[in-house]
Image (cartoon, rainbow, N blue to C red):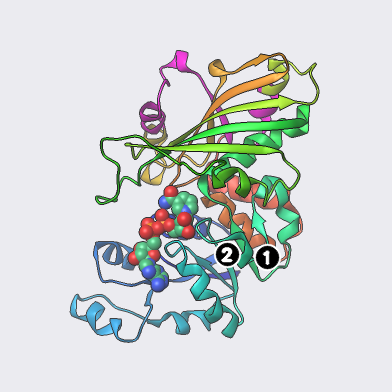
Amino acid sequence: MIKVGINGYGTIGKRVADAVSCQDDMEVIGVVKTKPDFISKMATKRYKIYTTKTENIAEFKNKGLNVEGTIEDLLDGIDVVVDASPEGVGAKNKVMYEKHNVKAVFQGGEKHELTGISFNAQSNYRDALNKDYVRVVSCNTTGLCRTLKTIDDVAGIKKVNATIIRRATDPGDPKKGPINAIEPVLKIPSHHGIDVKTVLYDLDISTMAVKVPTTLMHLHAITVDMIDKKTDLDDIVRALDKARRIILINGSDGLTSTAEIMEYARDLGRRRGDLFEIAVWKDGMNIRDGVLYYYQAIHQESDVVPENIDAIRAIMGMEDAEKSMDLTDKSLGIMK
Ligand code: NAD
């Protein structure tokens, strides 16, 4: 059993903890919380809790919450830590992981340079084999890599242009915005395309991004100039339909927006209404003069969860990427 700790138990951390618990070859030894809030209270029902500093322990005890110790105690008893702390905090935590000789999986809020390996299971699993540190790319980058890798394998890609229409914040966050504005990212190209190239190394891709007042998913509008101009829409549809962690949806079935996709995910009965798969509109695709046009929707809170599980297996030395993804997908009920 791979012994896993989760440092940072928020949107991503709590989902990764639950996904680790579903695996037969790994277990959650503990999760790290900074404050004795309602999330900590919920966490104690499933996991042992640790905290970031000794000074916090009394605060947890005053709220009637049992704490096993500090993060340093947790690190002494695990093989891998999944760092899902806020953007930039992971980089500061790395020194501590090095000191305790513990492997770490970081998230997309950290810079590629922190680990030198950025990860998307379908694209470059083997590059992370036996590494000490790996970074799972962001939710947007994960979505772009999944579909573009699939299309590249079928048709070859000359050039990609994509516009990322980003959710303002996650549903549980009452603070961030905008709540009544549309905010373009003025730095062009946006960082998303640059990030894709940390995984799909040779891809020619440029991205722009716009933030909009919603909490329900990101949406990508993508154009792909294909090398094989004879590729037709059926070839692309077949490939996307077969590929892992991608689902084809239809506006004609009433799935015309991210709101309806999230309703569909809730109806699937998944914990927290998560959609681990990237949803691509089959009836919103077209090819004109060798250029493929498509839209995809990304559930920002959950698409990186299966990637974290595979990243753990890769750094722990499981050589067979397909086997890891099979185990992950089966355990999480990922559709295919
Ligand atoms: P979050 O704010 O929901 O959760 C972070 C958690 O870490 C919170 O519970 C916070 O209390 C805790 N924390 C704060 N300081 C800490 C510290 N010093 N040590 C340990 N924990 C600490 O954030 P999130 O959305 O889960 O993001 C985590 C990482 O995942 C970031 O790198 C982010 O960029 C990345 N990511 C986020 C999303 C998303 O859409 N939410 C998607 C993909 C990747």
User: In the rendered structure, does residue 240 fall within the stretch colored magenta?
Assistant: yes
Are the residues at dot 2 and dot 1 in contact (C-beta closer than 8 Å)? yes
User: Residue 227 — which label?
Assistant: none
Quadrant hosting ligand 1? bottom left
Instruction: Pick whichever of labels 2 and 1 is earlier in the sequence.
Output: 2
The front one of 9 and 179 is 179
Quarter occupied by the C terminus: top right
What residue appears at the point 70 percent right and 68 percent down from the top-left corner?
A: 131
Question: Residues in magenta?
Answer: 237-264
What residue appears at the point 66 percent right and 38 percent down from the top-left corner?
A: 205
Quarter occupied by the N terminus: bottom right
User: Residue 315 — which label?
Assistant: 1
The correct choice, above or below, for 193 with respect to 46 in the image is above
Instruction: Determine crowd level at label 2: few under 14, some 14-19, many 20+ residues with C-alpha closer than 10 A.
Output: many
Dot 2 amino acid type = Val
Marks 2 and 1, how far apart at CA: 9 Å
What residue appears at the point 38 percent right and 33 percent down from the top-left corner?
A: 262
The front one of 219 and 260 is 219
What residue appears at the point 25 percent right and 51 percent down from the top-left corner?
A: 175
Q: Which residue is mark 2?
A: 105
Q: Quadrant of residue 86?
A: bottom left
